[in-house]
Amino acid sequence: METLIEFLSFSDPNVRYVAIGTVLLGASSALVGTFTFLKKKALVGDAVAHAILPGICLSFMLTGVKNPVYLIIGASATGWLSLLLIDLIVRHSRIKEDAAIGLILSVFFGIGILLLTIIQQSGAAGQSGLDSFLFGQAAALVGQDVLVFGIVAGLLLLTILLFFKELELIAFDPQFAASSGVPVRFMDFLLTTLTVLAVVVGIQAVGVVLMAAMLITPAAAAKFWTDNIKVMALLAAIFGAFSGLAGAYISYTAPSMPTGPWTVIVLSTIALVSFFLSPVKGILPRMFRQRRNRLQMLEENILKTFYLLGEDAEDWKASRTSDEIRERRRYPKGTLIYILKRLVRHGYLRQIKNNYELTNVGFNKSRRVVRLHRLWELYLTQYLNIAPDHVHEDAETIEHVITPELEKRLMEKLDFPEKDPHSSKIPLS
Amino acid sequence: MSSADWQIMLTGSFVAVSCGLLGCYLILRRMAMVGDAISHAVLPGIVLAFLVSGSRDTLVMLIGAGLIGLLTTFLIEFFHKKARLQTDASIGVTFTWFFALGVILISVYAGQVDLDQECVLYGEIAYVPIDLWILDDGTIIGPRALFITGGLLLVVVAGILLFYKELYLTTFDPAFATALGISAALWHYILMGAVSLTTIASFESVGAILVVAFLIAPAATAYLLTDNFRTMLWIAAGVGVAISVSGYYLAVWLNGSIAGAMASAAGLLFMLAFLFSPSHGVVFRQRRMRKGAEKVRKEKLTSGR
């Protein structure tokens, strides 16, 4: 706790630089990543991250100094070139985008490594630390770096805010964007440039391989909480910034721990929680909803069987054994007993020893399900001209989802019918 | 040419041919980036295998990496199917997560694991002739990597020969394959298992990036040169060998990283096919198109319209 306060007080100037740097990098790359994610080009960030290396080496070879401005220019040049080549390969050959990305990524990185070793062999002064670009060195960010990256990140944020509407349009519907006067080619160019810049500055914090996570993961996580793109972009930026800060903090408390990988671990944890638990689109809530729907269907089908058995005997309140039900609907015995017990618990059935009988509530409910089933069968035969022997299956699924309003409209449309296509009586409610 | 030279080129070729053959299936299944993801995601598997076995025992490493590789594939599918995340994002989230875990494991156990990020990324094929396989009684058999990657090549080639039909059908017509009773999912995982094993077996010698280059470049080059799948496999294997040999000489000439030079050579060969392939190259296609346009124009003139 003490270290947390100490960290958050930012009294140590070094901590201040690192924290500001990682927050800026996290937020800006997450924001750019939101758009590449929506354009389904999430992995181009990975290609750019690898393609930066030869640019850095070339820039060092040409200038002989490790000035961040020169390095950024060199890195941007080859990063940009890589995206151009991917596009060129996809447009002019049968190679698909994923293969083109993988090819450019590995070849550019290979060229970079080759250049890097040549520089190292040449024994040029001041080359040491050039390869720290590969692995990130957030903890070593110093004032000057933070200034440069801060300016770039600020520019990124500003550009995105300024062109938010256009970027949103080209991400979702380029054709519509073009027809409504958005300069699509320019916006594509802009997004490419923003991606390259985000990667160039972000790599300082997390390294080549993990840069892809800084772009993709916040957007992927944010998508699970909202359908609104503005909210999604904001959430992604918050996730990115928080992870950056958390990574810096962990590395501060345990100096042997690398900032970048921890940033990514925090980010991945947020993403996993979102995938599984988000109430809207998460896996677990959705599985839970599906299970609830399935149970409801089973319950209604069993109540319906009670009604049908009662219809045959003209006695709806008689007791039935589970075997009688099973003669009509072939459920596994365990499932059937489980559902019967649920129905008893919810007050639709009464259990007397091994027999079950409908309560008044249960009778009303069972009658309604049968009624909806037969109404829908009638609707299908009358309005969609489907043969009477083909309508049962469809009614079996629809009967569980018809609302009272829909029921009323069906009644009116069918002119308050009495019999279904199989000449069974449609029970009144 | 010294024995070290041919040992390195042979090791490179073994890896390149194994990867090239598997790569043909990967790029036709549009799974090139899954190969990339696996080659990065197996990192924690390697570290854990080191820690568990306390040695660089190849078998333990193969098992560790194989498991993590399959787990990666499974998670990519799982997030895609169950969470409805688009494929590329699913790949990106999964492998970066594993790689981060691997790097953290390395920093925690830095003293115990003789491994660093750099060697994982670029590998060091130059050490192949030095790292010898020595039996308990002192007999020197030869470079260890040569045997590992050679064994790998045998497994890959045998697998493709034995199960050619299954792999072919699940690649080109999964629906038909399923109708014949061949499980597309099973062969998906078998292929991914093979990619994981290839990655791990090539890791120390060539590094993650060269594995990716080998998985994609020879297959992509071959894809531009033929429309026949069997021919594509042969060309991919040939291109793999060509990359290794030319890459090695490039490295010697420039006195630089061998893995880097091989990846550069891979890019160069792809570029040649991209430009000059008789059937699919940019240059010939444009010439054909120009000729076609000329023909149409001439016909229009002679027909007097």
Image: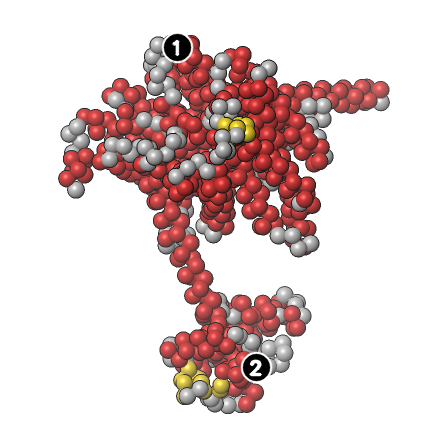
* Picture residue at 39% right of the left edge, 10% below the top: A123
Quadrant housing residue A354: bottom left
Q: Nearer the viewer, mark 1 or mark 2?
A: 1
- The color scheme shown is secondary structure
- Percent x, y for residue A194? 41, 27
Amino acid beneath label 1: Gly
Crowdedness of circle 1 by 10 Å Cα count: few (<14), some, many (20+)?
A: few
Q: Which residue is mark 2?
A: A327
Of pointers 1 and 2, the one earlier in the residue sequence: 1
Identify the secondary structure beneath mark 1: loop
| In the foreground, B257 or B28 | B257
Chain for numbered disc 1: A
- Percent x, y for residue B245? 60, 20
- Percent x, y for residue A20? 25, 29
* Picture residue at 44% right of the left edge, 75% below the top: A338
Tell me how many marks there are: 2
Cα distance in 3D space between marks 1 and 2: 87 Å
Q: Which residue is mark 1?
A: A123
* Picture residue at 39% right of the left edge, 57% below the top: A285
Amino acid beneath label 2: Glu
Q: Are the two marked residues, 1 and 2, in contact with CB atoms closer than 8 angstroms?
A: no
